[in-house]
Amino acid sequence: MFAMKKNDTYILKLILAYISQDLSEKEFNELKDWLNDDPENTKLFSEYLYFYKKSRRIGFTENVDSNHAWNNINTKLHQEPNIVPILEKPISKLRFLRQGIRFIKYAAVFIGVIGIGYYFMNQHKTTAVSGNQLQIADDKITLELENGNVKVIQTGGKQQRINISGKVVAEQIGNILNYEKENSAEELAYNILTIPNGKKFQVVLSDGTEVHLNSGSVLKYPVKFITGINRQVYLLEGEAYFDVAKDPKHPFIVNADDINIRVLGTEFNVSTYPEDSSINTVLVEGAVSIFGKDKTYDKATSLELKPGYMASWDKTKNNATIDEVDTNIYTGWKNGKLIFKNIQFKNIIKKLERHYNVTIINNNSKLDEKNYDATFDVETIEEVLNSFNKNYEIEYTIENNKIIIN
Amino acid sequence: MRLNDIEILEKLKIGDQSGYKDLFDLYYIPLSVYSLKYCDSFDQAEDIVQEIFVKFWDDKLYLKLKNSIGPYLFKAVKNNTLSYIRKNAKYRFEEIESQVNRLIEDEVVDIENIEEEKRKLYKEIEALPEKSRKVFKAIVLDNLKYKEAAEQLGVSVNTIKTHYSNALKQLRKSLDIIIVLLLV
């Protein structure tokens, strides 16, 4: 086809043209014929191509401008496009949304850990923070037994729980209390688990149902469930995440104040804190029915909840509303997160007190009724307060082991 | 510290937008480098990756992902880049291209690895005659067009091409490459 003898220089020119995608059909065909002439040619060509591609990515990483790319992406977003460009690595990342106005601030907080105390060094001259040390009390998780005795649970090790007749009914390892599975009980005997502020705990009931308990929660449950009787537990206060073991013959019922939540086998979150105006049930998986505490379950009159929805039972109005929600917002606490969505400042304070086991006194009553959204990950209470200070100039001091907001 | 996929997904699912920046920090460059391998255009590679990042956020794709994000992103980048090439590149030796691309590691794009190669390459480049070195840097590393390089160096486009081929010829074997002939 091509009588012309192709010399190296000419071939190299073709390869270059190929690499630059700057070649004619004629040149492409010439190159193709040359490649087909000899496997060695393909090898040579591959070497050039390989070297070129490798070099190009070196050049790319030298020249790429990530900040420009990041800002470019953000201008193209259609959903919530106002992510602030970030040029420095934050120590602590916090997100605030205030009354619908969304913005992000990255708070760089410096916590010096000296000895056993946390010393707070505030960078803002405007804040009147004393160098006082905040000492957080280590309140104990307790278990009230069927005979009324109260035992302290040491989360450090492994312990066995023995009932009145000397039988092992549960074993506790670290943060999990696990009840024996085999079911021989003939009458219901209740234990009451109390989780103080600043702590979280897990219990596995005798049917295998896992319950995560948030700070400031009290759960009452039978040591053993009895065959033929509904599995009923009582969330007397606080917040719990239930992963209910499937047992269609024995519906599982959680009583939370005014309501009963009935399930067969599913995952859901219930919170019934005194400061909240409603009892909230968020369904993660499966199906639940909600009905009044003095009523018996009736499919026709109870409220059915689908996964991804939240039922809010208004404690004063005695009615329920159902909303579609992002369930992660309501279950993040299991993983140590603290998430507020449209919560009044006075209630945020209560939740902070509970989460960190601290006392907060707010003298600035104007703040009380304002609603905030915020997400905290593993921040200390000082970091949380400091972020409120930076974002809203909320001033506070630490006096006599209390946090005072002025 | 860079977060992993699971930590990022967790953040995104609870509405913590900083997870999106973490995702960008973790994947933007590796994905762009990955796209570049196929399309050879700095701009096109970045456009493709940026478009995928935008889609990821706008369509809330993180809600659908369970344990990993990387495999999804790399796959999306590859698909979009290949479909771009099919539309735009006329003359390609598909088999050789994919053979060579397979030799260049992908998902494990490791910036340190690239840094190491960069040191090696620069050592080789320093050994080139001055003009070849400048042309190679301008065209391959700094992404200039022939015409732009010609203007910058005050020579003709043909001269640029000559220096460029001289540079390539000399550098070809510098990156420890063993091409095994698997092509039939």
Image (cartoon, coloured by chain):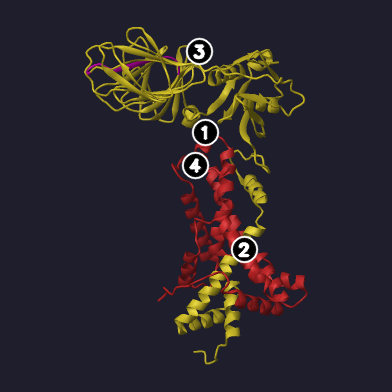
- Above or below, A82 against A252 in this view is below
Q: Are both tags, 3 and 4, on one chain?
A: no
User: Which label belongs to residue A323?
Assistant: none
Q: Is residue A138 left or right of residue A303?
A: right
Which quadrant holds residue A244?
top left
Amino acid type, residue under disc 4 in the picture? Tyr
Q: What is the spatial separation of the Cα atoms under label 2 and label 3, in whole angstroms?
A: 62 Å
The numbered mark, 1 or 2, whose residue comes first in the sequence reads 1
Amino acid type, residue under disc 2 in the picture? Lys
Q: Are both tags, 1 and 3, on one chain?
A: no
Name the residue carrying label 1.
B14
Q: Is B81 covered by the magenta stretch?
A: no
Name the residue carrying label 4.
B62
Where does residue A163 sit, x and y in percent of width and height? Answer: 29, 13
Colour of chain B in the rendered structure image? red
Q: Residue furthest bottom?
A: A3
User: Which label belongs to residue A274?
Assistant: 3
* Closer to the camera in the image, B51 or A69: A69
Q: Residue furthest front?
A: A115
Q: Which part of the image, by quadrant, shows the C terminus of chain B? A: bottom left
Q: Are both tags, 1 and 2, on one chain?
A: yes
Q: Which part of the image, by quadrant, shows the N terminus of chain B? A: top right
- Above or below, A42 against B26 in this view is below
The chain identifier of the residue carrying mark 1 reads: B
Report the magenta residues as a range: A227-238
Q: Nearer the viewer, mark 1 or mark 2?
A: 2
Name the residue carrying label 2.
B118
